[in-house]
Image (cartoon, rainbow, N blue to C red):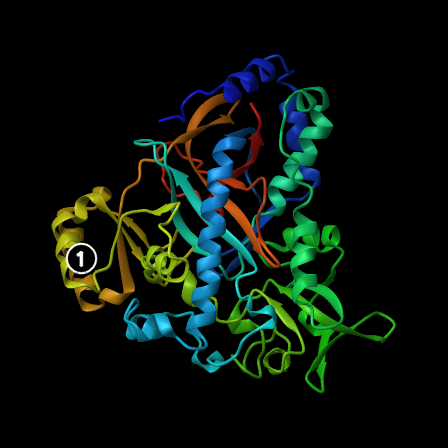
């Protein structure tokens, strides 16, 4: 089902229909010059591929986006309070709001960091929150929280620049909220927690799937783009070694490495990437890391179930944006419901990401469902089940024709002295009709998101 027609959509199609369709090919060529790639390791091989994109933007009214913004600010505030509480007093666990064993079994929970508070007590600085719009009630639903290393923000920035160049007259006729401030929002977050020194974006290198984004955000935010071997830790302080051999103190690191690869002295000693000693510097308060190490506990799909309770516990408020109806086989009554309704639920492995480990009950045979019940019963903490949300399609210009595709929306929320929601986001769409998986790692594409005034 397509999103309901609005004055904004009508205005877009009225103007866009008058544009030269041949410019779409020009648009694609220009985007190719940006070298917007999503790099994958598949079957043991490194594959550098162009990320599919669509010229037709998603359109959200300013009024509607304001409500989304309020809900996201509320959610990220609660998640930050949860992370700080969990790694210090753990009151939410002691008071039984979240079972202790449930937290301690989360793959992203790092007990070694209990008792440590980072700079300004902010842990989730740069967040990607994934939403869909339910076609049954027009409500936005949160599907997932990404509080470790969310990616994708550079793609709409690039496609927006292309609109201005290829369709300058058309673009000027649309009252679109500006988005160029995102790198400055990132820079402000780095400055806010900086412990003394320059800001850097830490990348594992060009073979990372989001390397284009690392370099883009470093350049636009005024930070240095550095690889792990270009940083050195001396006396628990982090320095950048420039090409002249000069050491420059680093005070804030926007890291694009997962926890396990940050420091071979602290995590995996066999790792060939990472910065030896950076965790010790971090724990000494001599460098800020965006995002904090240990945030993965809040990314856990099982912990997602408890976010509405976090909002009530820490803020005394009802959630503005709801979760998808979710069931935990960890709880007996939920397991019974899941087993009785598995054919209409979505089953997710909490250890997987990027669209992997997702099973749709309606696509499974009776035998497969029985096998899955056995697996879930043996390890209930490993899974969650959710009602299948029939979310809206978006129009996509594919194969020189307009086609409908399922699409979600990743919003970017940055916490510093206040919590800012970027006036844009990453709309991801499935390449195949009827497919619910829109992740880039599953072959999904992306499009711009226009927040517009009527």
Q: Position of residue 365 (x, y in %)?
A: 17, 46
Q: Residue at image x 14%, y 53%?
A: 337
Q: Residue at image x 20%, y 43%?
A: 344
Any part of residue 448 in sight:
yes
Q: Which residue lies furthest to the front in this view?
A: 316
- Residue 166 lies left or right of residue 258; in this view the side is right
Q: Where is residue 20 in the image (x, y as percent from the top left)?
A: 65, 15
Name the residue that disc number 1 marks. 334
In front of the other: 97 or 404: 97
Task: Identify the image quadrant of the N terminus.
Answer: top left
Q: Which residue lies furthest to the right in this view?
A: 244
Q: Where is residue 72 in the image (x, y as percent from the top left)?
A: 47, 48
In front of the other: 29 or 130: 130
**Number of marks in the rendered image:** 1
Q: Is mark 1 on a helix, strand or loop?
A: helix
In the displayed structure, would residue 268 be above or below residue 385? below
In the displayed structure, would residue 352 be above or below residue 49? below
The quadrant where residue 351 appears: bottom left
């Amino acid at each position: 089902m397509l999103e309901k027609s609005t004055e904004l959509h009508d205005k877009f199609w009225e103007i866009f229909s008058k544009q030269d369709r041949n410019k779409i090919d020009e648009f694609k060529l220009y985007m190719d010059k940006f070298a917007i790639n999503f790099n994958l390791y598949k079957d043991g091989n490194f594959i550098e591929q162009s990320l599919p994109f669509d010229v037709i933007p998603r359109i959200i009214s300013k009024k509607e986006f304001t409500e989304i913004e309020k809900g996201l600010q509320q959610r990220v505030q609660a998640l930050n309070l949860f992370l700080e509480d969990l790694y210090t007093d753990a009151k939410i666990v002691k008071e039984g709001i979240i079972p202790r064993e449930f937290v301690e079994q989360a793959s992203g929970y790092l007990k070694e960091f209990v008792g440590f508070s980072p700079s300004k007590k902010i842990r989730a600085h740069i967040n990607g929150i994934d939403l869909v719009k339910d076609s049954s009630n027009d409500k936005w639903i949160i599907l997932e929280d990404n509080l470790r290393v969310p990616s994708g923000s550079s793609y709409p920035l690039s496609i927006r620049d292309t609109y201005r160049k290829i369709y300058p007259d058309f673009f000027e006729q649309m009252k679109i909220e500006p988005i160029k401030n995102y790198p400055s929002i990132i820079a402000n977050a780095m400055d806010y927690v900086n412990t003394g020194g320059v800001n850097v974006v830490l990348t594992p290198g060009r073979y990372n799937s989001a390397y284009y984004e690392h370099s883009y955000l470093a350049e636009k935010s005024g930070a240095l783009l550095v690889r792990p071997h270009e940083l050195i830790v001396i006396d628990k302080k982090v320095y950048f070694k420039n090409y002249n051999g000069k050491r420059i103190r680093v005070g804030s690191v926007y890291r694009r490495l997962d926890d396990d690869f940050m420091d071979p002295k602290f995590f995996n000693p066999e790792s060939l990437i990472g910065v030896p000693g950076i965790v010790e510097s971090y724990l000494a308060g001599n460098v800020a890391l965006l995002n904090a190490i240990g945030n993965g506990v809040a990314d856990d799909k099982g912990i997602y179930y408890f976010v509405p309770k976090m909002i009530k516990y820490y803020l005394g408020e009802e959630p503005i944006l709801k979760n998808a109806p979710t069931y935990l086989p960890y709880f007996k009554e939920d397991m019974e419901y899941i087993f009785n309704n598995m054919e209409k639920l979505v089953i997710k492995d909490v250890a997987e990401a990027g669209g992997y480990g997702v099973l749709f009950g309606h696509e499974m045979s009776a035998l497969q469902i029985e096998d899955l019940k056995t697996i879930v019963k043996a390890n209930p903490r490993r899974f969650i089940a959710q009602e299948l949300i029939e979310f809206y399609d978006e129009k996509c210009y594919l194969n020189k024709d307009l086609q409908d595709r399922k699409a979600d929306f990743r919003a970017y929320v940055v916490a510093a002295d206040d919590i800012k929601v970027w006036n844009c986001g990453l709309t991801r769409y499935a390449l195949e009709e009827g497919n619910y998986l829109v992740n880039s790692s599953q072959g999904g594409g992306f499009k711009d998101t226009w927040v517009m005034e009527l």
